[in-house]
Image: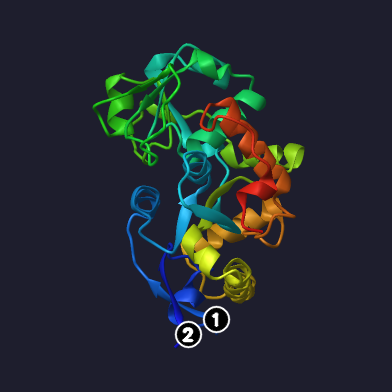
Amino acid sequence: MASTILRTAIGNYGHTKPLKDGGAVSPRFDMEHVEVSPVTSIFRRMVRNLEFDVAEMALSTYLCARAHGKAFTGIPVFLTRSFYHGGVVYNVKSGIKSAADLAGRRVGVRGYTVTPGVWTRGMLHTVYGLDLSSVTWVLSGDEHVAEFVAPSNVVSSPNDDLVAMLLSGEIDAAIGAAANDSPDIKPLFPNAQEADAQWFKDTGIYPISHMLVVKNQQLEDNPWLAGELFSLFQSAKKTYLEFLHGGAGLTAADQALLRMSTIVGDDPIPYGLDSSRHTLETFIRFNVDQKVIPEHVEVDAVFAF
């Protein structure tokens, strides 16, 4: 057994499975995996209590937490990515027909600083010209970073169910509402996959959702740790990609990643800064513009290497 044991909380994905079943190990540390469900609970527990040595973290939560001095640092291991056209729905009774019609409306989102919300608002502004300050953003939950103070056009609802808020008319549209079969709720972008592919073709942006963070004390005590973690996660991912492109025994999640490959290329979960610098720079700008973080930060300053 290695002398360093890292209390670790990460989701169960094809590319993390080798880390948990012993297929990918390091001679320099062991991982004590803590299973947390839903994965979003990891973020809150890490931000508020520094409960883990290594943790999965939503990208905007990390940027916000970093701005408030939380004692952990990012590693450029990007565990999940997603496109966001398909996440916007609206109540047909609202009269909304297009993204421009969201101006002056009430749009629900679980938290103002959640990563899908930041990416979607940035997309609505930069691609469809929506003035984000013209929208009232209605929250169905609170923020992982308790110290965050939202802009004046953000309000909280006592209701924690975006679908119920849509059906009651409390909100006109929502980002990230749960799936439902009501005829009154429709996708704002019915051809979402085509719109996602076009956005990627036009911008080269492949949105990062979740990343990896490490407690600062561990990085200070073990200067080699950031690089070793990156190498280990890369090794686990390599094993998974070989399985994924083999095409046999794939789960629904595996098949979804293969479909993503048709848009972004053979590696649907790229790690490292080189391939993601433009995406990260864009997302940092979105966070500044939306007042999730107070000022610009350089990509290289946000990660351990």
Query: x%, y% of residue 45?
Result: 34, 52
Residue 215 in sight here? no
Circle 2 crowding by C-alpha within 10 Å: few under 14, some 14–19, many from 20: few
| x then y, percent, for residue 160 | 27, 34
Q: Is residue 48 left or right of residue 248?
A: left
Question: Which residue is nearer to you in this view: 285 or 196?
Answer: 285
Answer whether labels 2 and 1 touch (C-beta < 8 Å): yes
- Picture disc at residue 2: 2
Q: Quadrant of residue 219?
A: bottom right
Residue beneath disc 1: 26
Decide: is 100 above or below 263: above
Farthest residue, direction front = 221
Residue at the image position 48 percent from the left and 67 percent from the top: 251
Element class at badge 2:
loop
The residue sitting at 67% across, 37% down in the picture is 282
Q: Residue furthest bottom?
A: 1
Q: Which part of the image, by quadrant, shows the C terminus?
A: bottom right
Q: Nearer the viewer, residue 179 or 277?
A: 277
Type of amino acid at the residue the image marks with label 1: Ser
The disc labelled 2 sits on which kind of residue?
Ala
Alpha carbons under labels 2 and 1: distance apart: 8 Å
Query: Quadrant location of the N terminus?
Result: bottom left
Quarter of the view holding residue 128: top right
* In this picture, residue 129 sits left or right of residue 103: right
Mark 1: few/some/many CA within 10 Å (<14, 14-19, 20+): some
Q: Residue at 56% of width from left, 75% of height from top?
A: 248
**Foreground residue, 71 or 119?**
71
- Specify the quadrant of the image occupied by residue 143: top left
